Amino acid sequence: MWIYHILYPNGAAPSIYHLYPEVSTQDLIPGLKMTAVLHARYRLIEAWSQKKLWEDSILTVYDADLGEGLYGLTRARAALEGSVRKNLKELVKRLAERVEALSDTSE
């Protein structure tokens, strides 16, 4: 354990991969049902070689109805947060599929 602290005094080991997100579009369509649209691009890079391992673009839409808030600002926030949650959920799903595909080919 002490060797780990000598090599990494701040307690954080260097990462193997870096995930770079880039939000290209985030729109809010006002109305009784607030609709938020989020389009993000993700790149997975191997840290030591800077080699691009994976890249994907994800578009998500979330509708916040009156049940999520009577005030417009509350619904707008709910819609924006919902679109981000859906986008991240889809990101995790696609990364898991990628890892599963890579593990299937290595067997």
Image (tube, grey):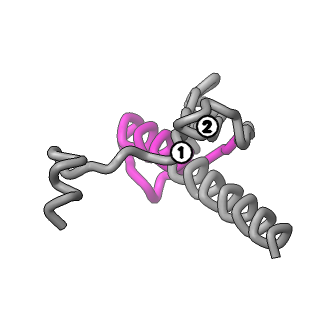
Q: Residue furthest bottom?
A: 107
Q: Is residue 31 visible?
A: yes
Magenta extent: 59-83
Which quarter shows the C terminus?
A: bottom right
Q: Is residue 101 magenta?
A: no
At mark 1, the secondary structure is: strand
- Position of 90 with respect to 85 (left or right) is right
84 over 73 or under it: above or below: below
Q: Vertically, is 107 above or below 39?
A: below
Residue found farthest to the front: 3
- Res 30 quadrant in image: top right
User: Residue at coordinates 58% horizontally, 37% vertically from top-left?
Assistant: 36
* Labels 2 and 1 touching (C-beta < 8 A): yes
Q: Residue at x 20, y 58 (%)?
A: 3
Q: Which mark is residue 17?
A: 1
The x, y position of residue 6, in whole percent, is 16, 49
- Across and down, in percent, residue 25 comes to 63, 24
Residue 7, horizontal then vertical, whole percent = 24, 48
Marker disc for residue 45:
2
User: What's the amino acid at mark 1?
Assistant: Tyr
56 displayed left or right of 17 = right
Q: Nearer the viewer, residue 96 or 38?
A: 96
Camera sees residue 37: no
